[in-house]
Amino acid sequence: MVKTVAQMFHKSTLDNPELTMLSTKNKKGVFIDETYREVEYKVISLALALFVNFRFQEQQLVAIISDNRKEWIYSD
């Protein structure tokens, strides 16, 4: 049983790694799909970058200010 959104995302990635998780429209109006596995890779990469490059610690709060973009999904 999952208790958090992070746990639900991890379980969904394990259960459906090749299923489309996110679709966004590029500048030409074509939808680009990303699988759970691809999104998970970007989530982990962002977390590691924050941890290594900025020396954030586990459970430390971080605020990211940006325009509306798909990358918000990775940071959540």
Image (spheres, rainbow, N blue to C red):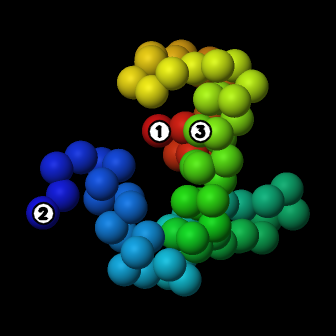
Task: Using a 10 Å C-alpha cutoff, classify the residue at mark 3 as few (fewer than 14 neighbours), some (14 to 19) or many (20 or more).
Answer: some
Q: Which residue is mark 2?
A: 1
| Cα gap from disc 2 to disc 3, whole angstroms | 24 Å
Please state if 66 lies on the left or on the right of 56 as rendered: right
Q: Is residue 40 above or below residue 20?
A: above
Task: Using a 10 Å C-alpha cutoff, classify the residue at mark 2 as few (fewer than 14 neighbours), some (14 to 19) or many (20 or more).
Answer: few
The numbered dot on residue 67 is none
Q: Label 1 is placed on what type of residue? A: Asp
The numbered dot on residue 76 is 1
Precedes in sequence: disc 3 or disc 1: 3
Name the residue located 45 percent from the left edge and 17 percent from the top edge.
61
Please state if 17 lies on the left or on the right of 29 as rendered: left
Name the residue located 57 percent from the left edge and 20 percent from the top edge.
56
Q: Is residue 64 above or below residue 9?
A: above
Depth-wise, is mark 1 or mark 2 nearer the camera?
A: 2
Name the residue located 59 percent from the left edge and 49 percent from the top edge.
44
**Residue 7 image point, x, y percent:** 30, 54
The numbered dot on residue 47 is 3
Q: Label 3 is placed on what type of residue? A: Ala
Front one among 24 and 8: 8
Front one among 33 and 14: 14
**Residue 54 image point, x, y percent:** 69, 19
Q: Dot 2: what SS?
A: loop
Whether residue 25 can be seen here = yes
Q: Dot 3: what SS?
A: helix
| Cα gap from disc 1 to disc 2, whole angstroms | 21 Å
Name the residue located 38 percent from the left edge and 61 percent from the top edge.
10
**Residue 45 image point, x, y percent:** 67, 47
Q: Label 2 is placed on what type of residue? A: Met
Quadrant (top left, top right, bottom left, bottom right) of the N terminus: bottom left
